[in-house]
Amino acid sequence: MNTAPPIPFDAERFAIALAAAMPDAVVYADADGRIRYWNSGAEAIFGFTAAEAIGQMLDIIVPVTLRQRHWDGYEKTMRTGQTRYGGGDLLAVPAIRKDGTRISTEFTIVPFRDDAGKMTGIAAIMRDVTKRFEEMRALRKAASAAS
């Protein structure tokens, strides 16, 4: 039987280590849409280092054709505190890498609020699902050609 006292759990240290080491992208943008946190998973998926991404607008990963819709929704969420996405909803959208490659991503968001309930930013946990998306598209194409 172990008689050593239990080691206290440090939730803050755990959260910092988890976000930093997670293979999925963890991206936090403030209320203006400026990137304030970019983990190593985001570096691997999008090709920008943290030094390159932090301080930039989310436009660096949002395809030009989707930017207006993205910013309309983002600004409405920041203004009203309401989002159609939340509660663990899995979103699927295209994104762009530093080299201009378009990729398919799935992500969930976590809204952040101040003590008064005002929106201060949004974190997204993102995964590159391009390979799976392309495989599904090929399967659908093969299935429709066989019919």
Image (cartoon, grey):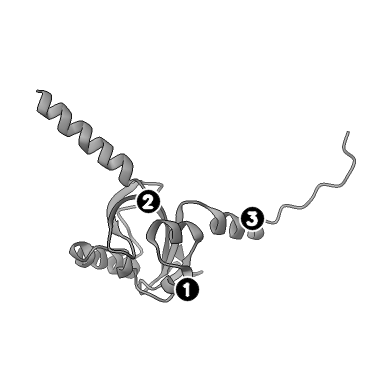
Q: Nearer the viewer, residue 75 or 49?
A: 49
Asked if residue 24 lies left or right of residue 76, the reply is right
Q: The disc labelled 2 sits on which kind of residue?
A: Phe
Closer mark to the observer between disc 1 and disc 3:
1
What is the secondary structure assignment of the residue under circle 3? helix
Q: Give the mark nearer the N terminus: 1 vs 2.
A: 1
Asked if residue 146 lies left or right of residue 137, the reply is left
11 lies above or below 71 = above
Where residue 41 sits: x, y (%)? 47, 56
Q: The disc labelled 3 sits on which kind of residue?
A: Phe
Q: How many callouts does the rendering have?
A: 3
Return the residue at label 3.
14
Closer mark to the observer between disc 1 and disc 2:
1
**Residue 51: assigned label:** 1
136 lies above or below 35 = above
Residue 111 falls in image quadrant: bottom left
Q: CA distance from mark 2 to mark 3?
A: 22 Å
Asked if residue 143 lies left or right of residue 134, the reply is left
Quadrant for the N terminus in the image: top right
What is the secondary structure assignment of the residue under circle 1? helix
Q: The disc labelled 1 sits on which kind of residue?
A: Ala
Where residue 16 sits: x, y (%)? 60, 60
How many neighbours does mark 1 have within 10 angstroms: few (below 14), some (14-19), or many (20 or more)? few
Instruction: Kindly indicate whether the residue at mark 3 contacts the one at mark 2 (C-beta within 8 angstroms).
Output: no
Name the residue rendered at 41%, 47% in the picture: 88
**Residue 107: assigned label:** 2
Q: Is residue 48 visible?
A: yes
What is the secondary structure assignment of the residue under circle 2? strand
Q: CA distance from mark 1 to mark 2?
A: 23 Å
Q: Give the mark nearer the N terminus: 2 vs 3.
A: 3
Residue 69 falls in image quadrant: bottom left
